[in-house]
Amino acid sequence: MPEHSISGGIELTKLLKFSNTGEGFDHLSQWMQSICKQHEKAEIIVGFEPTGHYWFNMGDYLKSQGHKLAMVNPFHVKRTKELDDNSPTKNDRKDPKTIAMLVKDGRYREVYIPEDVYQELREAVAERDRLVQRLTAINNQVDRWLDIHFPEFEQVFKDWRRQAAFLTLRHFSTPEKIAAAGAMKIVAIWKQSMKRTTGAKRAQELVKTGRVSIGRKIGLVAAEASLQNLLDEHELYVKHYEELEQLMMELLLQVPNAGKLLQIKGVGLITAATFVGEIGDVSRFQDPRQIQKLAGLNLVENSSGKHKGKTRISRRGRKRLRHSLFMAMITILAKNTEFRMLHQKNLTRGKNPLTKMQSVIALCGKLIRVFYGILTTGRDYSAEKMLGDIERGKTAA
């Protein structure tokens, strides 16, 4: 890892390279302290460009040493690095110097490293995303397998992940085996594991499709092994997902007032846990608009002279937080009466009505304010207050 030292625009020392180890971090610390002593400096600000994961451990180390951490935007680094030499050259000497100059000019934001339960929640949400991606990949691979070897399967079962369909694939992987087993044997397998079994009529239909299937017949031994491996993976990842959700609930309930977020109809565990994990300790925010900006949901406008550009969201912020709020609002609008009424009001107001997408984005901001109020005050969610806000809006209009 390269490091530069700049004070007031003056380069105080040459580039330092150190390893991503405890010994390397100690070497960095001694290097910084020696510079401070030599030039009579009392405070150190360490600048980072968040383009990878290597800064995590070093950030924790430097924070424990009492140093201030500064995060610079990679986009700013890319645009700024050509100013000194009018060249797009990128190397280990040039980039640290550019980062140091940005920090010197105050073009950074302070690094927030969540601790305790907030970091645990953030890690749990990231792991959940990984499991969801893996389960989605497995689902697509099984769908592909069925399209090749048993395309008629979906005529009987719309979702292979349902218990009866899953048991069928476990015990009778191919159309030939289903046809050979017969309906009675298939029903008997279902009864062994299911409290409420699918009827014999469906089993007969399955056998019928198995007899006339156009599924590929060659390479079936390896194909069956592949399917069973995919089903094994699916069971394993589902088990891990369920265990992780339980952990997320336990962690969420450790955060003051966070459990009250679940009182909002349409807000589930994943939305609440993602919000709390991504923002960390809510007391570090003085206004919910700061959280809106952190999510990249703040509005920006590109205008010049007489040209007035379109207003849009900045998309500069925590992507997972922004995506979670947007997807949560889609669910909320399907289940929550008061938010749906607000949405309708946005679409039909007499002056400057919003489009559907604009309304959803505006309601994401409203949801942030509701979450912020619950977390900071400890008050229960009030549907009546939300409806009162709607009525006051109508009166004002």
Image (spheres, rainbow, N blue to C red):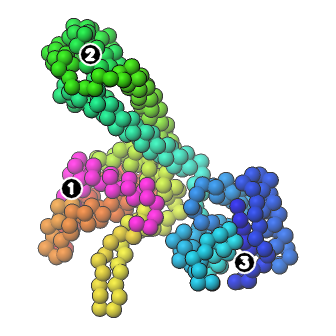
Element at label 3: strand
Q: Would residue 116 be counted in the magenta stretch?
A: no
Residue type beneath disc 1: Arg
Q: Which mark is residue 370?
A: none
Q: Which residue is mark 2?
A: 176
Q: Of label 1 and label 3, which has the lower sequence position?
A: 3
Percent position of residue 65, x then y = 74, 60
Nearer the camera: disc 1 or disc 3 = 3
Residue 191 in sight from this viewpoint: no
293 versus 339 height, above or below: below
Q: Which residue is mark 1?
A: 340
Q: Magenta stretch? A: 315-342
Q: Which residue is mark 3?
A: 6
Please identify the quarter of the rendering in which residue 138 is found. Answer: top left
Residue type beneath disc 2: Glu
From the viewer's perspective, tell me whether residue 294 is left or right of residue 205: right
From the viewer's perspective, tell me whether residue 113 is left or right of residue 373: right
| Main secondary structure type of the part rendered in magenta | helix
